Image: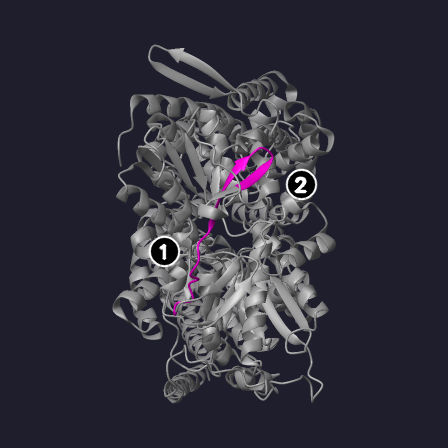
Amino acid sequence: MKSNFWKLMISIVLVSLLITACGGQAATEAPAPVEPAAPAEEPAEEPTEAPMEEPAGPITIGASLPLTGRMSEPGTAAKQGYEVWAAFVNANGGILGRQVELTIIDNASDQDTAVADYEKLITVDEVDFVVGPFSSFLVIPTSEVAARYGYAFVEPAGGAPDVFNRGLTNIFFAQPAPGDEQAIPFTDFVIALPDDTRPTTFAVVSQDDPFTIGVMDGVKDALTAAGIELVFDEIYAPETTDFSAIAIQVADLDPDLIVGGTQLEDTIGQIRAYQDAGYQPRLAFFTTGPSLPGPFREGVGEATEGVFAAISWFPEAEEYQNADMVAGYLEMFGGEMGDIPEDVANAFTVGQVLQQGVEAVGSVDNAALIEELHQGTYQTVVGPLSFNELGQPQGTFMLLQWQGDTFAIVGPGERARAEPIVPKPSW
Amino acid sequence: MHLPSWNVLIQVAVIGILTGGVYALMATGLTLIFGVMRVINIAHGAFLILSAYISYWMFTAYGLDPFLSVIVSVPLLFVIGLIFQRYVLSRVQGDPGLGVLLTFAMALTLEGLMGSLWESTGRSVRTAYTSNVFVIELSDITLRLPWVRVGGLVAAVIALLSIFLILSRTNLGRAIRATIQNRSAAQLMGVNVERVQAMTFGISLGTVAAGGAMFSLIWTFNSGSHEEWISKMLSIIVLGGMGSLPGAFLAAIIMGLAESVAAVVMSSYLSPIVFYLILFITLIFRPQGLLGVKVREE
Amino acid sequence: MDNLRRWWKPTALLILLAYPWIFRAPYYHVLGFNVMLFATMATSWNIMGGYTGYKSLGHSAFYGLGAYFVAIAANQLGWNPLVSAPFLALIVALVAVILGWIMLRTSGSAFVISTIAMLLIFRLTALNLREITKGAPGLSQPLPPWTPEFSRMPFYYYMVVWLIIALFVSWYIRRSRFGLGLVAIRDDEGKAEMVGVNTTLYKILAFGVSAYFVALCGGVWSYFTSHISPVFAFDIIVGVDMILMTMLGGLGTLWGPVLGAFILIPTSDLILFTFGSSTIYLAIIGVLMMVVIIFLPKGILPTIQQWIQDRRAPRAAHQGALSMAEMHGLTDDSPSVEEEIRHD
């Protein structure tokens, strides 16, 4: 009996292989994956003039965010941004006359979970649109999922080079500039310094994250081209908490400028380690951390003084709907205006771009939306945004420096509201 | 690979030794458990993090300095250890393979619970003296010794001396040593082995509590950190000789030093590999470690 | 009863094949894929952990290696993963044989720890070889060429096929001399050596075979998920899941690992879904594992088998029934010391 059984098994194995092969064949006749095969549920004939012949339900928007895990702080801020936006839009007539309904899932800063979340949102929940998670690290794999199903992917925080170099056309990064250009205002500032304060040496200490590496590469290129010598360049694992070995080496070399490719926790970790090692740079820049006013101050106390970072937004900015966003945030979440994290604004921007894009298209149609987003210019809380064919935004960041209890915008050009302090006071 | 300057090497070596002291504190309990129960307590790292969280919590909620809150955390963890051994671990007494898996499961459980309670934000205890440093100038080399790390080493020495005293001067200690040497013989001599095991686990977690307090001052941690730390501690006790306390201390210092130096000679990204390689090589080629007695693996 | 024995396998297979057409939402296809994937890996692990008694906690090292080899081959050489995986898995199996030759000089807990060390070394290496693996951010692969409607089905069927193959290999080993030798090693390695079993060779071979399917699964997974990173490819939890499933279903049995996978995957999915966050999930898995280890150390199948025997045969014939069951490979019972004494 047993050998008959196995003969049966083997024949079924062969048959299954045949099925798989045929299924693959038939399906391969369809063209490349990036073709926007729009999901079949939404009828494409929304009237473009005054809304609602049929009682259309809400427009559903799905997102997976790191609400726990190593990116939980900015992830939660992004969630708040999406929520503030949804509330604001719904209070003002919705999109195309329809209310917006958000579904946000926690991916625990885990790529696999994020990918599964978007699969579920698209194929099981069948949301109309998806918006992106926080960080290039999560955007990279999840954008593939959206591409697979032909969904537009407007995202608040994925600007690393690897986000844009994979041949996907559905990604739109809703910040003023892509990651590797984020530090341009800073490098310009450094290069333009007078000889007595201009650094001659610098060090780069970055976590192994696509976004931070992207920013660091941009900084390295600009500064070395201007003749400033790179004396130390180290990458560490994202979860590193002990920077003593690195700090000791940096302190020994004593570069004028320290540039950190960091998220919040390692910014704090690095600064503390430098303090322990007795390293006092004349200039310091970190990619994230200084832009999160509350936690950064709490983490390093008065060592914040004089630290630089790039930022896309600040609460008093006079940009489109910014006042509404700030008011909405304070009403929903309380606190002080000065404590609102930048990521809230980035998520809100995503919503704005989405809304304006969908309204320009006039219907719930991802394919048309993708095409529209490559062409239009959109008014947002971080300024006017437009995207090139890769989905990269075409603007610039602002440069901030901590002065006193909070930070001030010190560049570029006319956007400055305070004078930068050089050199940095001891931390 | 590059050779850093003398300054850096010496500074890094000193930090490495200080760190090794704290490692010793953490690893001692682990080797003790193995010696008495022949079980590899994979949950040791998770208990360490738990202690760190307790210290953190007592500091943020009550302002209690970790050096002081050990008065609470050590007995607390002692009791937890006793209960865990008596009612959970003892059930898989005969089978070391199952023991490893069980303690691993415990580690997962702890990680899950801690993560739910305290979320994943990195925590650490920042006191007024956290950034303070002893500065020592020797000829043309400046040594900077963070207070918290020196404190950690001092605490480690005190704790280890206490363990040593317990083991050598008390009846319980004698019973423990007898059980380590030869379990069945000890039983025949009238030692209540179950009780000894429970007490040992309790003492072991007690040292972990002290270790956790120091840990919370020096490093940042979250619920997932235990994996990294148990790997380090396993490497240490294997190198030292599983079951040997002086071995654990020696190995801890060596590892602390090796890790620190590797971070500047190779890169800090790659430096943990020192632990894993030493672990791997020791297990295969000299399983009794530096000071351990050759044990017949069952 | 006889009809059940005869027809349950073909029926089960039919259900498996029809499953994606009954449950059409891609979510179910993903679930099915995961079950097939882990059933295959657990079956594979069982060859080393169950039959031979060497429980490797770091087996996901091979999963990660398979994943990276396939991903790199797909990117650099354009090899279709579904075709390349079975071949690249051979290379990983070779690596396992070499490592096994080193590691299997130890036994018991030392072996377990060395497998963990092995896993961590691979992970750290993958993180640091950034030119090849792209480090922590991870490595992407081209998407599969078939249209979204089929999206996960091909993966599912592919794994059904490989599960059958793995089960076949496992079954074949059991009834072969090789398998007998493995069980002898598990029961008493010293004795096995004395009786003439080439324990070193057998252990290394078993290790290599058990690594093969796990590596293949890793390769398929990398294609499935399109994006892999060292922390997740070399994740210890994958290895733990393999062990948990096998132990749950029945360590050393043929179908135990499969049963374990069928139970554990949907359950853990349900848990994740209900509680949302990953930390509660970990706690529950941990507790589940402890419960299984303490109360069901033999796993479900052997416990059921025991129970059936105890009802059929009175206590006096217990020993006889036990030997029968062992012959059929349905338990992995070695009589405990107490039982030995009692029967004297």
- Mark yes or no: residue C306 visible: no
The span picked out in magenta is A389-408
Q: Nearer the viewer, residue B119 or A80?
A: A80
Given residues A243 and C329, the one toward you in this image is A243
Q: Residue at (56%, 40%) from the top-left corner?
A: A407
* Residue position marked by numbered label 2 in the rendering: B84
Q: Is residue A349 left or right of residue B140?
A: right
Q: Which mark is residue C203?
A: 1
Q: Toward which corner of the image does residue C259 lie, by quadrant?
A: bottom right
Tag nearer the camera, 1 or 2: 2
Q: Where residue A27 is drawn, which disc sits there?
A: none
- Which residue is located at x 61 percent, y 16 percent? B169
Quadrant in the picture for residue A120 = bottom right
When the figure is inspected, residue A211 is found, relative to residue C82, above or below; the finding is above
Query: In the structure shown, which secondary structural element does the residue marked by tag 2 occupy?
Result: helix
Task: Decide: is A82 above or below C157.
Answer: above
Vertical placement of residue A6 versus B201, above or below: below
Report whether mark 1 lies on the same chain as mark 2.
Answer: no
Residue A140 visible (yes or no):
yes
Chain at tag 2:
B
Q: Amino acid at mark 2?
A: Phe
- Picture coordinates of residue C147 (x, y %)? 43, 82
Compared with residue B153, is residue C117 higher up or lower down, i.e. above or below? below
Inter-mark Cα distance, 1 to 2? 35 Å
Disc 1: which chain?
A: C
